[in-house]
């Protein structure tokens, strides 16, 4: 069974409410941004950021699978 990772004083229902509100904000902001294309600098920046995100995501998955802890 998964550990309860909620902050003190927040129950599951409140956490779901906050997650729902966060998604509503993200959708609203996404819909406001109507620029259809990115310029070359933006594309390069996003490519680097996404690459780093997936590298870290993979490392975390490997550490969790092996029961390891991140280096400090």
Image (cartoon, rainbow, N blue to C red):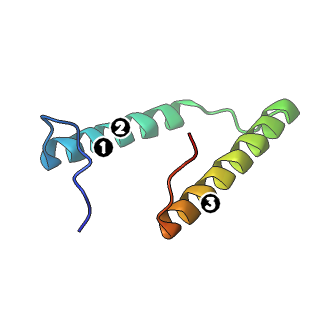
Circles 1 and 2, Cβ within 8 Å, touching? The answer is yes
Residue ID at (68%, 54%): 55
Q: Position of residue 5 (x, y in %)?
A: 26, 48
Q: Which residue is mark 2?
A: 22
As measured in the structure, the alpha-carbon distance from the residue carrying label 3 to the one carrying label 1 is 24 Å
Q: Nearer the viewer, mark 3 or mark 1?
A: 3
Residue ID at (46%, 64%): 67
- In the picture, residue 9 is in which quadrant? top left
Residue ID at (52%, 37%): 30
As measured in the structure, the alpha-carbon distance from the residue carrying label 2 to the one carrying label 3 is 25 Å
Q: Position of residue 39 (x, y in %)?
A: 83, 32
Q: Is residue 24 left or right of residue 37?
A: left
Label 3: few (<14), some or many (≥20) within 10 Å?
A: few
Quarter occupied by the N terminus: bottom left
Badge number at residue 58:
3
Quarter occupied by the C terminus: top right
- In the picture, residue 54 is in which quadrant? bottom right
Q: Position of residue 33 (x, y in %)?
A: 58, 31
Up-down: is 10 above or below 66? above
Label 1: few (<14), some or many (≥20) within 10 Å?
A: few
Mark 2: which secondary structure? helix
Mark 1: which secondary structure? helix
As measured in the structure, the alpha-carbon distance from the residue carrying label 1 to the one carrying label 2 is 5 Å
Q: Which residue is mark 1?
A: 19
């Amino acid at each position: 069974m998964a550990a309860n990772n909620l902050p003190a004083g927040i129950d599951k229902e409140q956490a779901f409410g906050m997650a729902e509100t966060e998604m509503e904000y993200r959708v609203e902001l996404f819909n406001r941004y109507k620029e259809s294309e990115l310029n070359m600098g933006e594309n390069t920046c996003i490519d680097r950021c996404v690459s780093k995100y997936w590298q870290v995501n993979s490392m975390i998955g490997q550490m969790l699978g092996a029961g390891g802890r991140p280096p400090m």
